[in-house]
Amino acid sequence: MEIPAIRLGAVSVYAGEKSGKYPDGNQVVVRGADTLVAFDTPLVANRLGRELLDADFVVLGHVHEDHMAGLQRLRHVPLYVHEADAEAARSWEGLARHYGYAPEVLAGMRIKIEREFHYAPRPDAQSYADGASWNLGGGVTVRAWHMPGHTSGHCVLLVEPGGIAFIGDIDLSSFGPYYGDATSSLVAFRRTLQAMRNIPAKVWITSHHKGVITDRETFLRLLAAFASRLDAREEAIAQHLRQNPSTLAELAAHRFVYPKSLDDLYYADAERRTIEQHLEALALGGRAIEEAGRWRSV
């Protein structure tokens, strides 16, 4: 069945299942006068025809399994990845370090992503840096804006003309930011969410959930709500510590990020990594302290 496209000048967006909700995503392709480029390759990429297969190269906004799910169809074209995420694209060992999960979780993750996301390493992946640009011909260009936090190499890809920004996993969802991997950073994500306001964009495209946003006021409102989840999580942890001095393991078991009714291979490790970063922030702000392995409110 043909997947309809949203056309935005040189940009076409093909929505994944449920508006690109994980495990799927939204496929973006950009056509210049003489070059076609794909941004990421979510599961929906496996249902596209020449509109994807004619791509001259692929640019990943960041490395995670759901953004590499169609790469096996484009093994013959160059792949560009930000230098901070490049090793995660080049080998399983690099991706395992990128995740940073426990060995038994990683073993299960490899099986899962090979089966469900067609995962295969790309040792040929070429690295790019902040500010990298690609000229697609006919005045169409793509520029990378390094916006770390979700991963250390997460980038926004800005298409001109039109000021069309593919903002990846700054997905503006009600769940809020994800920063539960070894290379994720709460501190960097907070800086990124401030900097997002300054990108000279007129249209914003997310990998998941929201899809295409064409109104700046709507974008800013969604961005503020998305960012507020950081403070909400931190405040929930602080309030818990006022009544219940806890170890990191106890806090992770309590679940401040994922509902207890849901589980996946990596949830426990991601929960722990997320809470660990908030504890560091609370300690730095003089709001919490660790004594003999237990955290308490100050």
Image: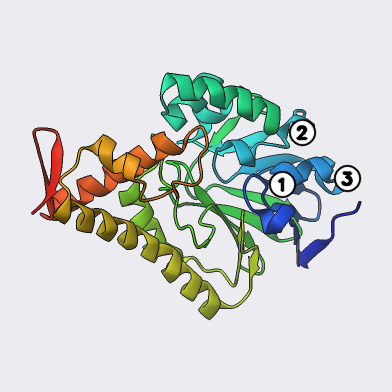
In the image, what residue occupies the spot 88% across and 44% down? 49
Pointer 2 with pointer 3, Cβ within 8 A = no
Asked if 227 appears above or below 217 in the picture, the reply is above
- Amino acid at circle 3: Arg
Does label 2 or label 3 sit earlier along the sequence? 3
Vertical comparison of 220 with 122: above or below: below
State the CA–CA distance, disc 3 to disc 1: 12 Å
Check disc 1: other Cα within 10 Å, few if <14, some if 14-19, many if 20+: many
SS at circle 2:
helix
Q: Which amino acid does label 1 sit on?
A: Ala
Q: In this view, does 295 lie to the left or right of 141?
A: left
Decide: marks 2, 1 in contact (CB < 8 A)?
yes
Q: Name which residue type carries label 2.
A: Leu
- Residue denoted by label 1: 38
First in residue order: circle 3 vs circle 1: 1
Which residue is tagged 3?
50
Decide: few, some or many residues near mark 3? Use Cα within 10 Å; few <14, some 14-19, many ≥20. Answer: few
Q: Residue 174 placed where, x, y %?
A: 50, 63
Q: Provide the residue designation for mark 2.
A: 74
Q: Which residue is drawn at 65% across and 34% down?
A: 79
Say what secondary structure mark 1 lies in.
strand
Mark 2 to mark 1: distance in Å? 10 Å
Instruction: Pinpoint residue 165: horizontal percent, then vertical percent.
Output: 59, 61
Where's the C terminus, which quadrant? bottom left
Q: Tell me the number on the disc at residue 1.
A: none
